[in-house]
Amino acid sequence: MKTISIYFSLLLLVFTSCDDVVNIDLKDNPPKLVIEALINWEKETTGNEQTIFLRESTSFFKEEIINATGATVSVTHENGSVFNFTETNPGEYNTTEFIPEIDATYTLSITYKNEEYTAVEKMIPVVPIKRVDQRIEDIADEEIPVVVFYFDDPETDKNFYLVNYLPDFQEKKSFGFGRDEFQDGNEIEIILDSEYIIPDSDEEIRDFASGDIIEIKLFGISRQFHDYFNILAEQAEPNTGPFSLAPAAANGNCINITNPQNRPLGYFRLSEVDTEIYTYR
């Protein structure tokens, strides 16, 4: 079995400054509902406890988070079973009765401020992580300590993956995503680098070191979510020049039934996930 290596690292956001002041007239658009409905089923668990977050978008210059309170939220299995989510904190909706099923289709239903929203998605499986290791890797002519993990991609199926990892000396998770277009049926090796840059951040930036504990998560995702995430990644990258193409709209799979023009932001995703905790030696 051939092993394919893939690098996953956090998107870099780079900002520069200049002396000229440019005044831009930004429209203060009406707020939109932001839906964070990410249903994750950890392997070897029942997956009954799930949380959905709702908030409202704000204008460019406002930093406060406006939680969407008072909504009615439910998820319906294809067999008709309904799982109701109760608001336990402002904008946070929970259930302890969810029943996950691989490849089953689920429908999200939200009523908020007299408007109805919905989305449909399948629960996507994921293969288990086989093993985790470490080594020194030559990256951009530098010797960098990395963590690597391996999994066997299922043959014949078209598979899409999301990876996130969190060293215990960092607060923000690093994300990567990929597909098996040229790796179908192979053992895949994912290479994780601890170095990244967050502008204006007080977080410690350093290489992996002995004793570091790294949480690694591998998610199965749909092609639609892969494409959506890819657009978000492209929009996070700095512009490459004055003739760069305008960014595509990062529309999720959620729609507004009552008022289609007032489309919500966010996504309804259902993923099986495998987690490994690795201690760097």
Image (cartoon, rainbow, N blue to C red):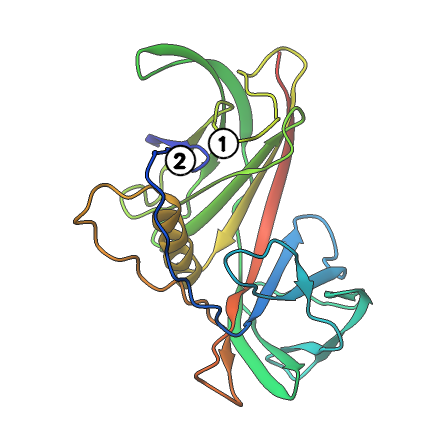
Residue 37 left/right relative to 190? right
Residue 45 seen anywhere in this rendered image of the structure: yes
User: Depth check: 253 or 60 in front?
Assistant: 60
User: Depth check: 86 or 24 in front?
Assistant: 24
Write down the quadrant of residue 240 in the picture: top left
Residue 71 left/right relative to 280? right
User: Depth check: 97 or 103 in front?
Assistant: 97
Residue 273, image x, y percentages: 59, 48
Near mark 1 (Cα within 10 A), the count class, few <14, some 14-19 or many ≥20, is: few
Q: Residue at image x 56%, y 16%?
A: 208
Residue 161 left/right relative to 169? left
Residue 159, image x, y percentages: 40, 52
| Quarter of the N terminus within the rendering | top left
The residue indicated by pointer 1 is: 199
Give residue 15's mark. Answer: 2
Give residue 92's mark. Answer: none
Q: Residue at image x 36%, y 38%?
A: 186
Residue 35, image x, y percentages: 59, 67
